[in-house]
Image: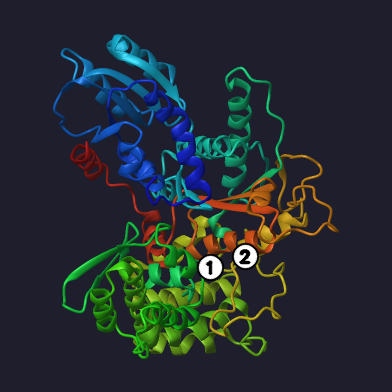
Amino acid sequence: MAARAEHGLKKVVWQKIKDTIIADCRKSEVWKILILDHFTTKLLSSCCKMPDLMSEGITIVEDLFKKREPVLEMKAIYFMSPTEKCVDALIGDFKGKPKYKAAYVYFTDYCSDALFNKMKMHCAKSIRVCKEINISFLPKESQVFTCDKPGAFRSIYSIHSQDKEKTLEALADQIVTLCATLEENPGIRYRESSLDNAKKLAELVDKKLAHHYEIDQGQPKKSKTQAQLLIVERGFDPATPILHELTYQAMAYDLLQITNDTYKYKAKDGSEKEALLNEDDELWVRLRHMHIADVSEQIPKLVKEISANKKQQDGKNVTISGLSQLMRKMPSFRKQLEQKTVHLSLTEDCMNQFQSHVEKLCKAEQDLALGADAEGQKVKDPMRTLLPVLLHPHSTYDKIRAVLLYIFSLNGTTEENLNKLIQHVKIENESEFIRNWKDLGVPIISSGTSFFPFRKSSRRERSLEGTYCLSRWTPVIKDVMEDAIEGKLDTREWPHQCEGPSAWNGSGAVSARQKHKPSALDERRSGSRLIVFILGGVSYSEMRCAYQVTQAIKSCEVIIGSSHILTPTGLLDDIQVLSKAPMEKFEILDEKVTA
């Protein structure tokens, strides 16, 4: 098998695809064509490679929506979403003169009766298999999933939205397929807030999950498993996705232009190079959650290790040019050295950004977010902390981030003060960057009340944890994860939509006196699961928390997901357009272009 990411969710998804789609392929010795839509292309790319498919009898992979030449002697596998657009494309392939010998159709999720009947009417004779395999989420990492719906943010929080209920329904369907893939029937809780989106989503997931297990191949109704699903809205913790993070992954995605997990950099010879930052890169997995200071120390050491293996004594002051020479001298170590070259370059880029402007921002941001300085002294006047940031020639986005942290620290400010801040940042015509946070339930204008008044009062004490002074903030979701596993979540703040087994305490009902084996990975997987879904986007620092808590509490695996993954500037851009009316004509033209 190819060097696929042998981790968590990705491994589970690939196994399920093999047990359904690939298993059917094995029944025939004829080579097959695999036809994918945009979503299933991403899904399959996340968990397998072309050699994996070739070894299973699939020789060609095609785009459902592109023009394809007929191959009458081959059978075609259609792995697609249950949408009218996909079904119409399938019908087009078999209407009149068929393009393929037969069709094996696999839907990611439940196919409506209307679409099924439409397909049956036009091409029933050509379809050999038609199944719903219940995988409509993307396994981004071993413990992270997304619904691949960045547009859900606008649909749920924009005052102009006309498809909010439809979006919540779609997200619920995707969460249900996650639970089904993991073979979990979790208890469900949600974070109480006046926006009610988390509550509505919890109700939908509960209803759809019950329905799924009732109709699941006529099996007896599945009882609740040792798992819990927590649903919370983005406004629950507005500070985390706005702060400048100094851990490797979060910092890189914040400060550098990384698109579709692809990092572009220049080699010593000036040529443009690309590297994919994913779990196929073992060094990336090892380094991604470390503080940038630790990463900067680790990479030269790792390079020296390889250099020492070949009796190279010039491992001091490692540079990219030095690595290039090593690569030419040691072909057998090429792949390892390429990875280290990538991460040396990535680390240098991050550190250049840090030294040029981020370092000056971090102390102020940390003090505002925590309400105290590195010595533990309370910040008595947040404006004195903010002012140096506003007076320094930082970028507009950086100033907006600092202003927001100032407002969050006060639980809202006065209209007069807000107007002055907007003038300072010079965004009089773009004040929505700040004002629109109210649509997420975050108080911007102080009113004496808050949608999330608990945010600051119920934080865990972490002063004894060893941290860098510019990285003292801990995402609120980490507190929630730990409280959930320890059974400490307040039922008034976290009501049960449906309760799991009474013994669920996040430790697989293991006695507190029983010692856990730190390296027993299989034991962990057979224990309990905590699934966290953040409505409105998850940040990279929150993703890191899932791994940290799982590592600390061996018997509980934490999985975190959302509609999409956030970056600070991306979130600010999404916030800014919430109050703008949709451009209908533009959307219609865009639909034609992508069709």
Indicate the position of residue 539 as horizontal and vertical percent values. 49, 61
Indicate the position of residue 563 as horizontal and vertical percent values. 46, 48
Q: Residue at x 37, y 31 (%)?
A: 81
Task: Identify the secondary structure beneath mark 1.
Answer: loop
Q: Residue furthest front?
A: 311
For this rendering, which residue is in front, 370 or 32? Answer: 32
Q: Earlier in the sequence, mark 2 or mark 1?
A: 1
Amino acid tagged 2: Val
For this rendering, which residue is in front, 410 or 549? Answer: 549
Task: Identify the secondary structure beneath mark 2.
Answer: helix
Left or right of 327 in this view: 152: right
Q: Residue at x 47, y 68 (%)?
A: 288
Indicate the position of residue 172 as horizontal and vertical percent values. 53, 37
Residues at marks 2 and 1 touching, judged by CB atoms closer than 8 Å: yes
Q: Which residue is mark 1?
A: 240
Is 210 drawn above or below residue 439 in the view shown?
Answer: above
Indicate the position of residue 71 as horizontal and vertical percent values. 17, 23
Q: Quadrant of the N terminus?
A: top left
Amino acid tagged 1: Thr
Q: Quadrant of the C terminus?
A: top left
Can see residue 449?
no
Is 77 drawn above or below residue 524 in the view shown?
Answer: above
Picture disc at residue 28: none
Left or right of 526 in this view: 581: left
Q: Residues within 10 Å of mark 1 (few under 14, many from 20)?
A: many
Q: Which residue is mark 2?
A: 476
For this rendering, which residue is in front, 11 or 307? Answer: 307
Can see residue 304?
yes
